[in-house]
Amino acid sequence: MTITWIRQTWDGRTGSAALNSPLTTGEEYLVKTDDKTDTELDVLTDTLAPYLGQPHPTAQGLYVEDIQVKQAKESPYFWKLSVKYSNEQTTAEGESPSETSPEFDPAVIEWSTENFQIPIEKDTTGQAIVNSAGDPFDPLPTKDEIRVVCTISYNSLSVPVEVLNFPNRVNGSAITIDGLSVPEGEAKCTGVRVGGLQQRNGEFYRNVQFSFAIISGGWDLSILDQGFREREPRTNDLVNIVNDGDQSGDGAAITSPALLDGAGHKIDDPNPADAVFLPFSVYGSIDFTVIPGIS
């Protein structure tokens, strides 16, 4: 069975608005099928026909609430289809207000913070935290940190493929969540949860939840450039750094890492302002805008 064409009739448009009542509109269509034995169920379930929960093509907030079909008297190939749109929201026990189809429920966005501690190598001015001799502390000092966490929940009729490829990825471009701008690389997916099957209005669905931790400056690592070897200036070969830079030097290999200049050479008489931090990208990126609530 196939609907060969479906056309809206100009004289079938209706509308209703009243105090304490939902806003409704109505449309009628003339449908032609290719088999005279087609039934009303064939018409209702055809992919060309409107479906329950379908958004109104022009009026935001209206969804298909009711569909009626009746065979035309003139021919068994023709049907009259009546569609009612409404902005009324129904509430099932234990669920939030929603339109006819669960997947049309708006995404729920929540914000929170989480506390943790991290090793710290530089201060608020960007200078290295080292001792008076220019060596980094061992072990590194730590500091308390708070980061913002955004949780987005929405309904899906199936388990989305994003649950497999989003964890531990960062946003590959600047995004907006709840009206807040998040620069590229500053949000990382830290958790995914998919609930069990639920049913509403004849449709099975799952509640899907994504958590994103946001850090100003991004998730790339910034590591102090230091080590026990350096590049030989003439050959560029790696050689051991030895204690021969001052009167106390004995030519023996150093026993603690020396600060390097970002090009593989030891910094003589270093101070905190001389320290170089090397950037490393350690998380893959992905397009976060496929998640409802993110643009």
Image: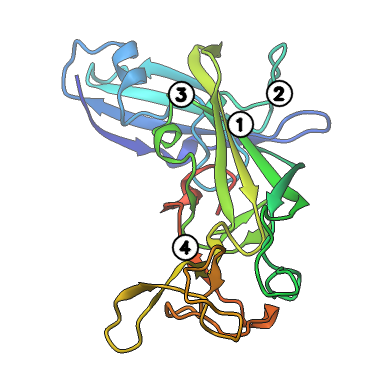
Q: Which mark is residue 96?
A: 2
Question: Number of marks in the image?
Answer: 4
**Among numbered discs 3 and 1, the one appearing first in the sequence:** 1
Report which residue position mark 4 lands on.
Answer: 280
Mark 4: amino acid: Phe
Q: Which mark is residue 276?
A: none
Mark 2: amino acid: Ser
Measure how far apart labels 3 and 1 are at the Cα level: 12 Å
Front residue of 70 and 226: 226
Residue pictured at 52% horizontal, 70% vertical:
225
Are the residues tagged 3 and 4 within 8 Å (C-beta)? Answer: no
Residue pictured at 67% horizontal, 61% vertical:
216
Measure how far apart labels 3 and 4 are at the Cα level: 39 Å
Q: Which mark is residue 157?
A: 3
Are the residues tagged 2 and 3 within 8 Å (C-beta)? Answer: no
Q: Tell which tag, 4 or 1, sits nearer the viewer.
A: 4
Element marked by disc 4: strand
Q: What is the image's colouring?
A: rainbow
Q: Position of residue 94 (x, y in %)?
A: 72, 13
Report which residue position mark 1 lands on.
Answer: 105
Are the residues tagged 2 and 1 within 8 Å (C-beta)? Answer: yes
